[in-house]
Image (cartoon, rainbow, N blue to C red):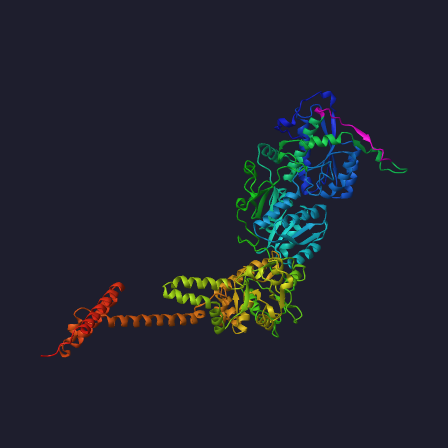
Amino acid sequence: MLLIFSRWVPVEVMGQTGNASARPSSVNVGALFTFDSVIGQAAKPAIAAAVDDVNSDSTVLPGTKLNLIFHDTNCSGFVGTIKALELMEKDVAAVIGPQSSGIAHVISHVVNELHVPLLSFAATDPTLSALQFPYFLRTTQSDYFQMYAIADLVEFYGWREVVAIFVDDDYGRNGISVLGDALSKKRAKISYKAAFTPEAPRSDINDLLVGVNLMESRVFVVHVNPDSGLTIFSVAKNLGMMTAGYVWIATDWLSSMLESSELVDPNTMDLLHGVIALRHYTPDSDLKKSFTSRWKDLKSKETSSFNSYALYAYDSVWLLAYALDVFFNEGGNISFSSDPRLHDTNGSTLHLTALRSFDEGQKLVQTLVGMNFTGLSGQIQFDPDKNLIRSAFDILNIGGNGSRRIGYWSNYSGISVAPEILYMNPPNTSSSNQHLYSVIWPGETTNQPRGWVFPNDGKPLQIAVPYRVSYKEFVTKDKGPLGVKGYCIDIFEAAVKLLPYAVPHTYMLYGDGLRNPSYSNLVYSVAQNVQFLNNVFCTQYVSQSLLFYSLPLLQDGENTVSTLGRLVLILWLFVVLIINSSYTASLTSILTVQQLSTQIEGIDSLISSIDPIGVQDGTFAYNYLIEELNIAESRLRPLKNVDEYANALQLGPKRGGVAAIVDELPYIELFLYNTDCKFRTVGQEFTKSGWGFAFQRDSPLEVDLSTAILQLSESGDLQRMHDKWLSLQGCSSQANQVDGNKLSLTSFWGLFLICGVACFLSLAVFFCRLCSQYRRYQPEGEGQEIEAPEHTRPRRAMRSTSFKDLIDFVDKKEAEIKEILKRKSRDHKRPESQSSDGQPSSPS
């Protein structure tokens, strides 16, 4: 088979021709894979064409021909091993193949001993590492990158769990293992691994799919061989698993199978409608176009199965040719030596002595790894782990008569546009850079599937409910159908009814009913898979869970007396300041002293004190105070019920009680209400958490139930349920006090009384003094007006004049009034003195 084909060869792989006579006339090269397979039917003609092109190119390996030796492994690891040993007997310098990862594992041990390079164009198992198998070189893309591409797809669509369906061999197991690692980095996981044997009958696959269909996840990742993979979708179609709500993701085996068929089978496409598949990304180039056009011109039956593996197989031959050319130019020599450890025993027909070791095989491997050229599949260059440096995949959506590309993935920038464009820019794996075109999902829908359903396995969701002995309004045991009742139960039942799917569930009491169970232990039990859950995440808050203090509430009389007792000294100052018109300054002083006199004002003052603190038995507050606030455990007093709350507060810290109780706001409000508002809250809340329903980590129920709770809140149903169970209007004013030690207006009624009396007395003194001065005051001309006959003065005029005189008197300055009074006093004394010194006059 001869394909005449011109080829561009980069400068870096071409060395000086050197002495042609020093080169061997031919080099044996083995080709080992399964001929009658989807990959083998594409690889065999491609390898043969590549050998012919190399031998006809005078610029590569001048004077040396590649002698190609084919061996068929027949999809058998045992046959593959025998065929590999037969190739070793022919002193091959390298082996092209195999396609099977399982066979590659076995043969790699052989080539490691004999130092023969093994170039595999289809063994994608990521565990075929360079450290364990130094002579193995993968010339295609590793499944390591393909599984990370699938993990990015799962994250892109927001799914949390997938079911892995895979063939149970090295290729399937190891690929899915990498997928699990990749998903865990995206906070997703494989919920179930459904494996089947390579030769599993249809009935086994049917049983397998029936089982996974009962599970929660509706995202299926299919990682199988292309020769038997369609059976999966055929069975799924019969089981109704290719309808709306299902997600199917296939690795590159599906695209390879579809590309191998010249004519599209409508029945096959009907099975695959809506599937997302990955395909090796190979950039368009003139080399690739020329090769594919030549491929179509060939008349052999073998040429009908063309796929991307044909490109990798063709490039593998050219990689070996370029490496041999450099190898010879650097003085390399093809020679073999017998291994003394291999010898034939008596009667053995294995001919082990015919297996000889390649003397400079290690040098040829190093040369192969250092190659850098552009082939049909793109750039051929290896990283330190001997993987191709640019791994990329097309993301396809199967439907109609074929497939359409909805995006790309590369190990350079994740989900993105065409990789060639990105290679010119720095890597960018941010979510804003990830774009995919719309997908037609199974069931002919463009609506993205949720990716999960409630499992239809007959097992209801088991919900752990604390068996409380206090605050039973929230949740408690009941004799009704549910077995429990309370505020939290009503919310959960209402939220479940809003879900677009049924959630069968049962309630399980947690605790012995003698004391409140520990919420920390309850959550830990959930985390330890007691409730079939792994880690705990909570829904949208259904109630605020702020931590508050509770203190005894002083009665009004006690509060007033206490306030007056603390302000006795200040009141005297207040009276003095009233007289001196300093009312504002004195009030400010009073408020300042009152604030300074409070004992517990907030969390800081509580921490700095040494008084005992009460906490509800079983709640998280106990550990929170110790671990977060560094309060000594010896100061904490667990309280089991409302009576213990009240007794501890009434006794106080000096009589065996507590100085304050730290608890969550809903409990505090209920406690205040049940104790007739005898206590109050103090200080600001110091946590911002809330109450919610705990589910497994990344459970899809978490999102849907949170949405339902928000709907309850927006519709007012949440508040109505709150009012039904927790109607606490009676203590709302006291429960919401920011600081119970702050003074209110009612605390100052005694002070206001004293101030009023002082003001009244002051005004009385003032008016008495004013009246006294006015009586002594007599305006000029008043005497004549007084001597006038009373009947000649109108009554209204006399009153108006007197009121006006009084106003004029008040308006006069104090100094002026004093001066007038002094003058009148002198005038009054002068007539008296004259009367006493002279003789009294008698009438004539």
Residue 512 is inside the magenta segment: no
Specify whether 353 is left or right of 634. Answer: right
Q: Residue at x 68, y 22 (%)?
A: 17
In this rendering, the count of numbered labels is 0
Residue 342 is inside the magenta segment: yes
Viewer-closest of 507 and 326: 507
Mostly what secondary structure, the magenta segment? Answer: loop
Q: In which quadrant of the rendered view does residue 41 lie?
A: top right
Viewer-closest of 802 and 121: 802
- Rendering coords of residue 7 (x, y %): 62, 28
Q: Residue at x 71, y 27 (%)?
A: 327
Image quarter (top left, top right, bottom left or bottom right) of the C terminus: bottom left
Q: Can residue 184 be seen at all in this image of the molecule?
A: yes
Question: In this view, which residue lies farthest toward the left?
Answer: 844
Q: In which quadrant of the rendered view does residue 358 lie?
A: top right
Viewer-closest of 163 and 446: 163
Question: In this view, which residue lies farthest toward the right?
Answer: 346
In this view, 528 is above or below 76: below
Image quarter (top left, top right, bottom left or bottom right) of the N terminus: top right
| Stretch of the chain drawn in magenta | 328-343
- Rendering coords of residue 231 (x, y %): 66, 51
Q: Can residue 254 be seen at all in this image of the molecule?
A: no
- Rendering coords of residue 479 (x, y %): 62, 75
